[in-house]
Amino acid sequence: MNKEKNNLIKEYEKKIKLIKKYNRQYYEKDSPSITDSEYDKIKERLVFLENEYKFFKKKGSVQNIVGSPPSKKFKKIKHKKAMLSLSNAFGKEDMNDFLKKIKNFLKSYDSTIDFFSEPKIDGISATLIYENGLLKTGLSRGDGETGEDILNNLKTISQIPKKIDAKQIPKILEIRGEVYIGKKDFETLKENFANPRNAAGGSLRQKFSEETAKIPLQFFAHGFGIVEPMIFKTQSEFLEKINQWGFSTNPHSKLVKNLNEIENHHKKIESLRASLDYDIDGLVYKVNNIELQSRLGNTSSSPRWATAYKFSSEKATTKIKDIAIQVGRTGAITPVAKVQPVTVGGVVVSNATLHNEDEINRKDIRIGDTVVIQRAGDVIPQVVSVDKTKRDTSSKKYIFPEKCLCGYKTRKEINVVTKKEDAVRRCLRGYDCDYTAKEKLKHIVSKEAFNIDGLGKKVIEQLWNLKIIKFPADIFNLDYNQILKLEGWGSLSIQNLKNAVKKASSIFLDKFIYSVGIRHIGQENAKIIGNFFISIDNFSNLFNPLKREKLLNNLNELDGIGNTQILSINNFFANQKNVEVIKALIGVLQIKNFKIINKKGKFSSKSLMFTGGFEKMSRSEAKSLAEEHGGKVLGNISKKLDILVVGNVKPTKKKIEKAKGLKIKIVSEEEWYDFLNI
Ligand code: IVH
């Protein structure tokens, strides 16, 4: 009996461990490695053991430890207004830049701009839409464009009003905020989750809202999506009002007016941080005036009117055991210090970036050195300084390898604009270098590119090592039967992967251009280029060297595209392998035409150019207004230009003459304001 009991206890403990492992896989968003039914079988067996044998009772109910895995089957709903992310600031200088950029954009140098500061809650974002005061829609952030319908789960949170009982509320009111779990409450949930944020995420994604209701979730409201009619003038007024309407808003918010006040407030809240019952990782600073917010608008990923000022980074001292090199998707060689594991701000760090060869030389960093490393926000830890007093006398200067991991020579290029040698060494073999190619694949599946769920960096690594994928098109021609046989894959994860790949194979031209990973072509530039070519057929003309030259000349006329980008595109397409890769992708994808955002705008199908300074607005604002009204902004005068807008402050005479010669319509600063009704 004793032996049997021992065996049962062993089995029980093993299965509990397994279940916890699978729970983590589920909750911590990577795709689960077993099917629901396999999971249920283990769970059933555990429940059986607990019910059957008294000696398990003391260990507590399996149900409590296990919970139920979050569902993947929520209805997808497109956000009425995209849920963007925030840019980051890591210190006073970054904040100064943020303030300067705003002033420049608004051309507001004399008047002060009020900023509203709020803690940045480390939770899960959600958005709630109230129609005539009734909570009708509740979505997760999803990829920012499309969220998941988690209304029923959100309704279990007591701090989320189901109904707003107040007069004069907007007909449509979208409230955005953060779902979180208090630090104290988390203590009882520790078993299942790595941290409160994961716990909140897992709980919100439960299939049955009764499960969600068991978890003590809380909600802080911090922003709005669509509001009709818009009745708020400032962020502070908005928060005050919705607080009266029953939403909980963070009490540690404050109106600040300048960098000094920002710094003081920041230090004050940082000193409170540990005593708060919820995790915060910095403060969000927002332009308080909502009209100014809309004038400032957004870049492709974040608003210009807000930033997250992270708390100062955490530092630790450790020793460099070795220096390894890593190859990035552009072939950039990055040295990485392998350090003795050390805890920095609660996270164990064993790798820290050394940036590039010049940085190692400048700081004279050597293997064996005692160094200070720091971790700020979610960025990769870095080596900041060396303690040379602790250096061994036998230590030798680190010689940076001249070869890539693929064995071929690397080069430092000459920057076309500055004419100086790059600090970064690169392997220029592109897809011919296995290391670069693998990174390119990781970029292709990333969130901002094809966004293939279940095909993260680790999976790419696995499939690459097994030679299942080598080129991007292989991702869309996977042999799923072969993958099913691999460790860690089950029928459920295969089905999810199939769905994700299928969904990703239909893509807009601009996303496609970004995804193929041309150096210097980020999301913004990809949009400009997408808008220029419109269709993949037109874009494919770049394969032809003769057509390419002409096209690139035209492309060069667009505002935002400069010599650096043109040269990079040219180099990219001059490489036959790249062309082959793109052709293969075109063969397996459905590439949709660029969506012209504002076809019916005042300037639709017109191209504009600005010269001289404007009194009421910056060049950037003028440009974004022109685009908002459907126009295309050029950087040069040519026959293709339709309108030259001449600002009153020092316009270039030559440009005006040239435009006149080409019979281009010339518009004065005053006429420009009339156009826009301002
Ligand atoms: S304002 C454009 N205020 O941080 C987004 N966001 O990286 C404007 N967050 O997903 C967001 N606390 O969910 C704002 N007080 C706060 C916040 C906050 C946490 C989250 C937000 C967003 C992420 C942005």
Image (cartoon, rainbow, N blue to C red):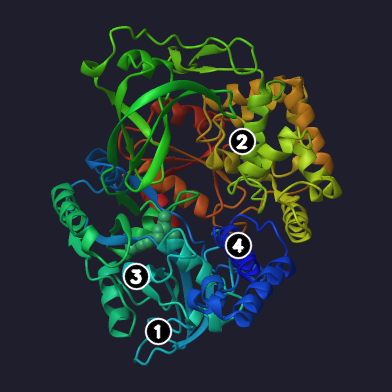
Residue 631 picture location, percent across and down: 55, 48
Disc 3 under 8 Å from ligand 1? The reply is no
Height in image: 241 above or below 607?
Answer: below
In this view of the protein, which residue sits in the foreground, 205 or 591? 205
Q: CA distance from mark 1 to mark 3?
A: 14 Å
Q: Secondary structure at mark 4?
A: helix
Q: Is residue 592 left or right of residue 31?
A: right
Q: CA distance from mark 3 to mark 4?
A: 34 Å
Q: CA distance from mark 1 to mark 4?
A: 41 Å
Task: Give the quarter of the image for residue 344.
Answer: top left
Q: Amino acid at mark 2?
A: Lys
Q: CA distance from mark 4 to mark 2?
A: 77 Å
**Mark 2 Cα-neighbour bin, 10 Å: few <14, some 14–19, many ≥20:** some
Q: Is residue 599 left or right of residue 563?
A: right
Task: Please report whichever mark, 3 or 4, sits nearer to the chain's N-terminal start.
Answer: 4
- What residue sits 59% from the left and 78% below the top? 50
The numbered disc on residue 640 is 2
Residue 671 picture location, percent across and down: 41, 51
Q: Is residue 386 left or right of residue 437?
A: left
- What residue sits 63% from the left and 77% below the top? 47
Q: Secondary structure at mark 3?
A: loop
Residue 361 at least partly seen: yes
- What residue sits 38% from the left and 86% below the top? 169
Q: Amino acid at mark 1?
A: Ser
